[in-house]
Amino acid sequence: MPADRQHHTSKKLRYNLLLVPSEDAGKSKTIRFAPWQVILLLGGLVALIVTAVLLVLVFTPIGAIVPIQNPELENKYGRELVSLNQRMTTLMEELIELREYNVKLRNALGENAVATDSGVVIVNAPKSSATKETKKEIRTSPTTQAIRNALSQQSTRLSENTVEEKQQVVFPVILPTEGYISRGFEAEQRHYGLDIAGKTGTPVNAAADGHVVFAGWTSDDGYKIIISHAGGFLTFYKHNQSLLKLSNMFIRRGEPIALLGNSGQTSSGPHLHFEIWKDGSPVDPSRYILNLNF
């Protein structure tokens, strides 16, 4: 008996599948399976089902309905959303800054402007002036138009202040900083001023007496100052390293207003870009500067 039990135990375990036909025409068949074959068959069926489900989710609209969690994709898209949100915030801040700059410049030039959600609105603007502005805007840029629109009012105000304070604005003007002229006035190349190359940190002085109508940062020109003078003159000082004066200040001729630098996207090296505008149009500064030698 022990020998027979040991003999039966040593036999391999197998499964028999009996196939019986529904009619008597055929004979029954027996298929024998080993355990590893059953496991392999079940594993293959599971793999086939999983593959089919994945294909359906990826290549059919059903995948958009059924959420699939993927930490790596979630982290990637989350970082992209954060980056886009930061860019939108930066753009909104720049838009607000430009709107405030527009209002500040218009108010400094004599207009009564206020910022609203829809843009910049001119309060109590004369109808005839508004009509003329609309016609002029077709032929000129917004910056030039803003200067032209209020230049007469600003010049009148500055002239009255000059008389009251017994101050006299003198033209010709002085060269604003120490250095050499690296490029002159080239209106056909849209270069409306002089480039004065110099050492970073060199003082930049006011070319003549006047009021600061703008002092701040712009993307192209970097740190920039605009001074309004009597007689319809404006002087521009661009690409400074830093500014020493604020808007609405009265500046004396030769008084330091900034430090020479290389700021702004259009600057290619340490220099001061100096412009003179007369009645809303740029003019060659060399015609007004004393002791200028090219």
Image: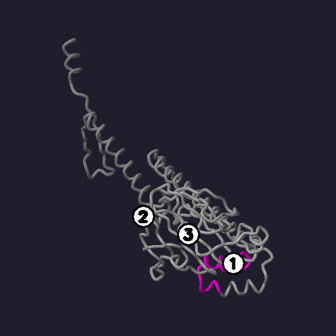
The answer to whether residue 95 is left or right of residue 33 is right
Q: Position of residue 232 (x, y in %)?
A: 66, 78
Question: What amino acid is at disc 2?
Answer: Ser
User: Magenta segment, which residues?
Assistant: 136-154
Q: Which residue is drawn at 50% across and 72% down?
A: 291
Distance from the alpha carbon under mark 2 to that under mark 1 = 32 Å
Q: How many labels does the image show?
A: 3
Residue 151 disc label: 1
Residue of label 3? 174
As helix, strand or loop, the secondary structure at mark 2 comes to loop
The location of residue 52, given as percent across then percent down, is: 38, 53
Residue designated by label 2:
268
Observer-nearest of 96 and 6: 96
At label 3, the amino acid type is Ile
Numbered mark located on residue 75 in the image: none
Amino acid beneath label 1: Leu
Q: In which quarter of the image is the N terminus?
A: top left
Chain-order first, disc 2 or disc 1 = 1
At horizontal 72% and vertical 75% (from top left) the residue drawn is 154
> For the C terminus, which image quadrant?
bottom left
Q: Dividing the picture into quarters, in which one does residue 130 lie?
A: bottom right
Secondary structure under tag 1 reads helix
In the displayed image of the protein, which residue is found farthest to the front?
291
Q: Which residue occupies the foreground of this view, 149 or 285?
A: 285
Q: Earlier in the sequence, mark 3 or mark 1?
A: 1
N-term-proximal mark, 3 vs 2 = 3
Q: In this view, does 163 lie above or below 51?
A: below
